[in-house]
Amino acid sequence: MSFPRHTAESATPAGAASIAAAKQAFGFVPNLIAHMAEAPALAEGYLQLSRLVGETSFTPAERHVVWFTINAEHDCRYCMAAHTVIARSEGVDDAVIDSARAVESYDDPRLEALRVFTLELVRERGWASDDAVQRFLDAGFTRQQVLEIVLVISHKVLSNYTNHLVGTEVDGAFAGSAWAPQPESAGAAG
């Protein structure tokens, strides 16, 4: 099924408002938002969650580890490309980005604990074991951060699932960072 990629002119007034907000936030209208404008509440929810995820207690590298982990697990090629560009613009170390894109473990034990716990939450649909939570806390994270991962997962479900449904084309700004999983690693690292 085909879904429109809206412009400010083709969208409803509420959808156009989200398109304008995205343009202001990103400097252009990402194709994801242009598609989301078909359901203005979805576009607005995504933009609000984007802002809130940026206000979590995670460092930029940690935030991107969570995003990348979810994107790879959901096989979201659009978001992997977009977050690669965004991570680089935020100064995230290339080794972190490269491991994420290869769906590999991190050498940094703290980032690896974050990746593993995020995967557990995604794969178990939030039913993390007490042992898994304790290992995450023992790695230096907090109970607040346990719950902040739930926020980030919610954010990624909105974008990843939308991209799957509508077949979002990777924007020119992200095309140089196109991503596809290696067959043996697609969702397999854990």
Image (spheres, grey):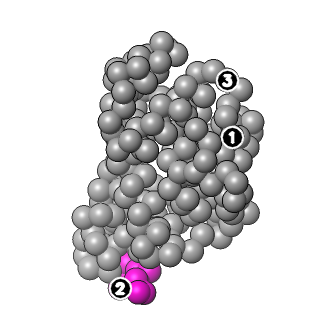
Dominant secondary structure of the residues highlighted in magenta in the image: loop
Q: Residue 61: percent from the left, percent from the top?
A: 59, 33
Residue nearer the viewer, 113 or 48: 113
Q: Nearer the viewer, mark 3 or mark 2?
A: 3
**In the rendered image, is residue 113 in sight?**
yes
Residue 9 part of the magenta segment:
yes
**Who's the residue at 65% across and 70% down the image?**
172
**Disc nearer the start of the sequence (3/2):** 2
Quarter holding residue 120: top left
Residue position marked by numbered label 2 in the rendering: 10
Q: Residue 131: percent from the left, percent from the top?
A: 41, 20
Residue 104 is tagged as: 1
- Marks counted in the figure total 3
Residue position marked by numbered label 3 in the rendering: 108
Using the image, determine if residue 153 lies above or below residue 20: above
Quarter holding residue 100: top right
> Label 1 amino acid?
Glu
Numbered range of the magenta stretch = 1-10
Quadrant including the N terminus? bottom left
Assign a secondary structure to mark 1: loop
> Label 2 amino acid?
Ser
Using the image, determine if residue 52 lies above or below residue 139: below
- Rounded to the nearest whole Å, what is the CA distance between mark 3 and mark 1? 12 Å
Using the image, determine if residue 117 lies above or below residue 101: above
Horizontal side, residue 145 vs residue 139: left or right: left
Assign a secondary structure to mark 3: loop
- Rounded to the nearest whole Å, what is the CA distance between mark 3 and mark 2? 47 Å
